Image (spheres, rainbow, N blue to C red):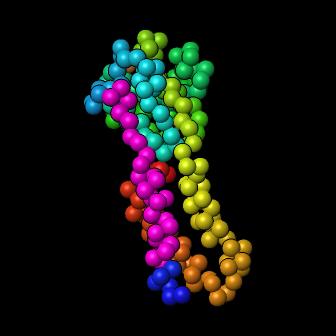
Amino acid sequence: MPRSIIAAVLLLLLWPLCHHRASAAEYVVGDVVGSGWDSGVNYAAWAREHTFAVGDVLVFEYVSSQHNVYEVNESTYKSCDTGAGGSNGVRAMYTSGYDTVVLAEARAYWFICNFPGHCLGGMKLAVNVSASGSGGPSPAVSQTQTDGNSNSAASIAGEGRRGWVALGLALVAIVLMNCPSFAAWQ
Ligand SMILES: [Cu+2]
């Protein structure tokens, strides 16, 4: 079978993976462009109206002089107390006013505003992120890349097939680089 046919078949097999990632959703927290992250919004209700999967993106839009976004652990989310140093239970801090947070793992995420009183006033968001629906094309791709870099994969493939393996890996790389959401997915 000519390599060009194999290349075409591989591309056809890989496009759905790309398409799957391209479907990752981006949510403006609070649904208001520019100021969706603000005091006086019921973020529990907002979170209930959406479902979040691995690869989805939260965009926090707010006036940076009035709010910020701290990703925290559950106890800090509940207490709203980041301690005297402002870092107790804090996993990440965002302060730009336009912060994109990739939900890269299937777990709960907790966010608060760390301006005095804002979290206690209800400016806090908890989301549950589920594994992506189809059971994990993303790990499959990672596996392919990992195997391709190891000696065992090459020896299993055999001398004569080494060229095709390389061709396949090159195609995987090309497809991934052309996936619009690949950077976000990472
Ligand atoms: Cu605030």
Where 109 sits versus 66, above or below? below
For the point 47% across and 82% down, the residue is 5
Residue 156 position, x and y percent, is 72, 77
Q: Which residue is depicted at the point 54% across and 75% down?
A: 168
Q: Quadrant of ligand 1?
A: top left
Total tally of numbered discs in the picture: 0
Placement of 165 over or under 108, stated as above or below: below
Q: Position of residue 97 (x, y in %)?
A: 33, 32
Quarter of the image for the N terminus: give it: bottom right
Q: Quadrant of residue 68?
A: top left
Placement of 129 over or under 19, stated as above or below:
above
Indicate left or right for 101 with 133 as reference: left
**Would you say residue 84 is visible in this rendering?**
no
In this rendering, is residue 66 above or below 141?
above
> Predominant secondary structure in magenta?
helix
73 or 129: nearer the viewer: 129
Which residue of the protein is positioned furthest toward the left in this rendering?
A: 34
* Residue 29 inside the magenta-drawn segment: yes
Compared across the picture, whether 30 is left or right of 8 comes to left
For the magenta stretch, what is the residue range? 7-31
Residue 80 magenta: no
Return the x and y of residue 170 as percentages of the image width and height.
Answer: 50, 74
Give the residue displayed 51% in from the left and 25% down from the top: 126
Q: Provide residue 91's location: percent of width, then percent of height.
A: 55, 33
Regarding residue 127, the answer to whether it shows in the image is yes
Between residues 84 and 42, which one lies in front from this camera angle? Answer: 42
Q: Quadrant of residue 82?
A: top right
Name the one closer to the observer, 41 or 20. 20
